[in-house]
Amino acid sequence: MKRLGFVALFVAGCALLYLLQRSKADAPFTPRPLLYLLADTQREAERIPLTVTRVSDQDEIKAGEQIAREYGLTSQRSDNPDAARIAEYLNSVGTEVANHAQRKAIRYHFYLQDDRNFVNAFALPGGQIVVGRGLLELLESQDELAVVLGHEIAHVDNRHAIARLQYETASRKIGLGEVYQLGKPAVEIFESGYTKVEELEADRVGLGFAVAAGYSAAGGVNLMKRFEKLEPENAKRANSPVGEFAQVPFDALQEYFRSHPSPAERLAAFEVEITSRGYNQSQSIRPLAIRSIFLTDAAERLDRAGDFKNSIARFKEALGLDPNYTRARRGLAESSWRSGDAEETVQAETEVIHRGAVTANDWRLLARGISVSDPVKGVSRLEALEAEKYATPNEGNDLYVAARIELAGLEFLNHRKDSFAEVPFLSGFSQSRAIQQRSIAWWMYRAGKLDLASQQLEAARQLFPQSSETAIQLALVLSDLGRQADAEQILSNGPIRSISQEDVAERLAVRAVIDWRTENRDAANRNFQSAVKADSVWMVPRWIANNNTASTAGVITQLQAAESSRRLKEAAARQLNEIGR
């Protein structure tokens, strides 16, 4: 009898699909609706015995809280300021939207899944809503976020979430109070999505919640249009989807599309709902206040990939939304310096110092930018900024000392040989003193005073021998002095533990320089190729010129030419292979 009922439902569904296809539909016809129908019909047939049981709001809240605890969800503020800001924003917007839900006993809590590879959101029973960072990266307005949160709220308000849990507990023959026995699968139940009917219902109801909260219905339309572009079958046809969408993790995004109806269907349903309800799509769209965070994330990824032009553009876009976002402004300064634009570096770091807390690296980057853009007049500019920040000299403050070192460095570059004698070095901190001496050595190296630079670096090594940065810098100075054997020994016997990808790349690049100078060209090219792979900044001529002596810059220029030639040959070979196919 059950099989006959299922067959009847299937036949009726096929007939409905035929009628829908004959009517004027906005979404294209694909096998996907039929697959949804088969899966949903079976699932709904299995759920029929559960529909007569209604769990109380209090029992649902307890079950949801229990699952949330098992999953590790917490309302405790994150130590990461960006994550804390996102979570606060989610709860602010989510509460606005949830105020228009029907079930007033439910108190909603919104959590950030701080993982950009989690491109999804899900609702637990009792109002526990989880939103992935990867999904938030795709949003462009607060109205879109309101629609996303409204969708998840609707799953709770319409009892989809608790019905799903009832089915799972019944199939395992355990009580609702024993949901802890489900462990991690308890969350996976809700991550995997609902039936197509429930998903479309949550879209419709959630859109109503968002509109009632004062958001534009265009938020849902805009979001589905973007999702349509991102859908795997459409993204493949895009010219540059990764660049266009800030390196979206497409593999993770596929999970979202597997658990929801197609964006085309959802867009069509939104447009029908908007028309039938008379929602105003021309209402102004609110900016996404946290978007500057995601733009900055994208800018940092582009910088690491060596796409400095687009990196700088993203940082500036983030600052256009939030001029006080120091992380974006520091990122702009770093990316500008790595691109070889010293003037932009100076402007960005000047703003950082004007606006807030300063680090030693801010002074360092500002001074280095000035040393290229305007080394003579820049001394007074740096003096004024130092006086602004430290109206009263504080020789016990390491940031004040850092500022004094950079100012002395600029003066040394301008042929004031005794400038470093006035630096108030900190005493008692060997690592800090070693870092200070390394900074002084950089200025001596840039001024061509290689013997003095090597002395400072040797002293820094004695104070803090664990520093790989000091060993790399010393090896380069010794190579510039013509002491290739000593440079090789320092590089080979020095600390090999690198603290960053940039450190790894610099070690390889210095080794390539030593190899080139000792006529070991094959090894030099291999090491330089590896350096560029680790950090593409080594292919930027202006960055090389701004950070090295003329002699070293000349060697690296030849290494860059050899690498460019290798790439051209590789590209030509690939093209021939493509033609051969």
Image (cartoon, helix red, strand yellow):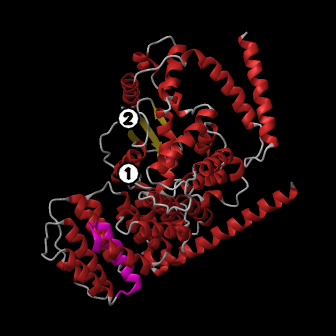
Q: Quadrant of residue 196?
A: top right
Q: Which mark is residue 89?
A: 1
The residue lying toward the viewer, choosing from 502 and 68, is 68
Residue 355 highlighted magenta (yes or no):
yes
Asked which quadrant contains residue 11, the reply is top right
Image quarter where the N terminus lies is top right
Residue type for callout 2: Lys
Question: Looking at the image, which is closer to me, 146 or 183?
Answer: 146
Nearest the eye: 475 or 238? 238
| Picture coordinates of residue 444, whole percent (x, y) | 33, 78
In this picture, which residue range is highlighted in magenta?
354-375
Which numbered disc, 2 or 1, marks the residue closer to the eye? 2
Q: Nearer the viewer, residue 469 or 123?
A: 123
Q: Secondary structure at mark 2?
A: loop
Image position, residue 199 (x, y; %): 59, 37
Residue found at x 49% / y 54%: 143
Could you say where residue 93 lies in the image, as x and y percent from the top left?
40, 49
Residue 262's x, y, as percent? 67, 43
Q: Which residue is mark 2?
A: 104
7 w.r.t. 403: above or below: above
Q: Residues within 10 Å of mark 1 (few under 14, many from 20)?
A: some
Question: Residue at 68% across / 47% down in the picture?
Answer: 264
Magenta-span inclusion, residue 243: no
Q: Give the CA distance from mark 2 to mark 1.
A: 22 Å
* Residue in the picture at 71% in, 68% down: 568
In the shown orientation, is residue 541 left or right of residue 331?
Answer: right
Q: Quadrant of residue 238?
A: bottom right
Question: Is any part of residue 548 visible from this angle?
Answer: no
Task: Please state the total of marks drawn on the protein image.
Answer: 2
Q: Is residue 187 above or below residue 175?
A: below
| Helix, strand or loop under label 1 | helix
